[in-house]
Amino acid sequence: MKVKIQQWNAVATWRWDIPEDDVCGICQVHFDGTCPTCKYPGDDCSLLSGKCGHNFHMHCILEWIKQDSAKGQCPMCRQRFEWTEPLNGTTADIT
């Protein structure tokens, strides 16, 4: 017996690899949602993880760091904010 598939509609989902109850420390929106700057989840606003272990939407932390009052510090723990890039394992200083 042979079966011929006439049409196939694939559906995919994605999730950030972080705890389920984790939200951006700046905008307080869950990472599966959108930051205030983005239109759709995951479009152009990736997740940035700091060396300190705190996670933020990319747009949120970049706007935070631009503020003079931020002094280049993590908004959660006030350590100097340096992000990690888990895709290639490198780290970079945002300030």
Image: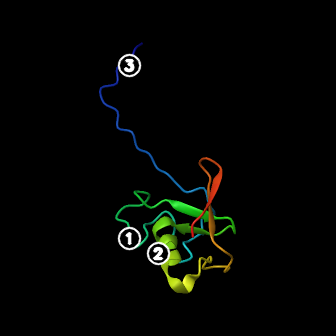
Q: Nearer the viewer, residue 43 or 92?
A: 92
At x 40%, y 73%, the residue is: 36
Amino acid type assigned to the residue bearing label 1 in the image: Thr
Quarter assignment of residue 95:
bottom right
Pointer 3 with pointer 1, Cβ within 8 A: no
Across and down, in percent, residue 21 comes to 60, 69
Across and down, in percent, residue 33 comes to 45, 66
In the displayed structure, 69 sits above or below 49; it is below
In the displayed structure, 18 sits above or below 90; it is below
What residue is disc 2 on? 63
Instruction: Single out the residue that lies furthest toward the bottom.
Output: 69
Q: Which mark is residue 86?
A: none
Indicate the secondary structure of the residue bearing disc 2: helix
Indicate the secondary structure of the residue bearing disc 3: loop
Kindly report the distance in space between the C-alpha atoms of the residues bearing marks 2 and 3.
55 Å
Residue 27 seen in the current view: no
What residue is disc 1 on? 37
Across and down, in percent, residue 23 comes to 56, 71
Kindly report the distance in space between the C-alpha atoms of the residues bearing marks 3 and 1.
47 Å
Indicate the secondary structure of the residue bearing disc 1: loop
Kindly report the distance in space between the C-alpha atoms of the residues bearing marks 1 and 2.
10 Å
At x 53%, y 75%, the residue is: 65
3 or 1: tag closer to the N-terminus:
3
At x 64%, y 69%, the residue is: 54
Pointer 1 with pointer 2, Cβ within 8 A: yes
Q: Nearer the viewer, mark 3 or mark 1?
A: 1
Quarter assignment of residue 38:
bottom left
Q: Nearer the viewer, residue 77 or 2?
A: 77
Across and down, in percent, residue 91 comes to 64, 57
Instruction: Single out the residue that lies furthest toward the top.
Output: 1
What residue is disc 3 on? 3
1 or 2: tag closer to the N-terminus:
1
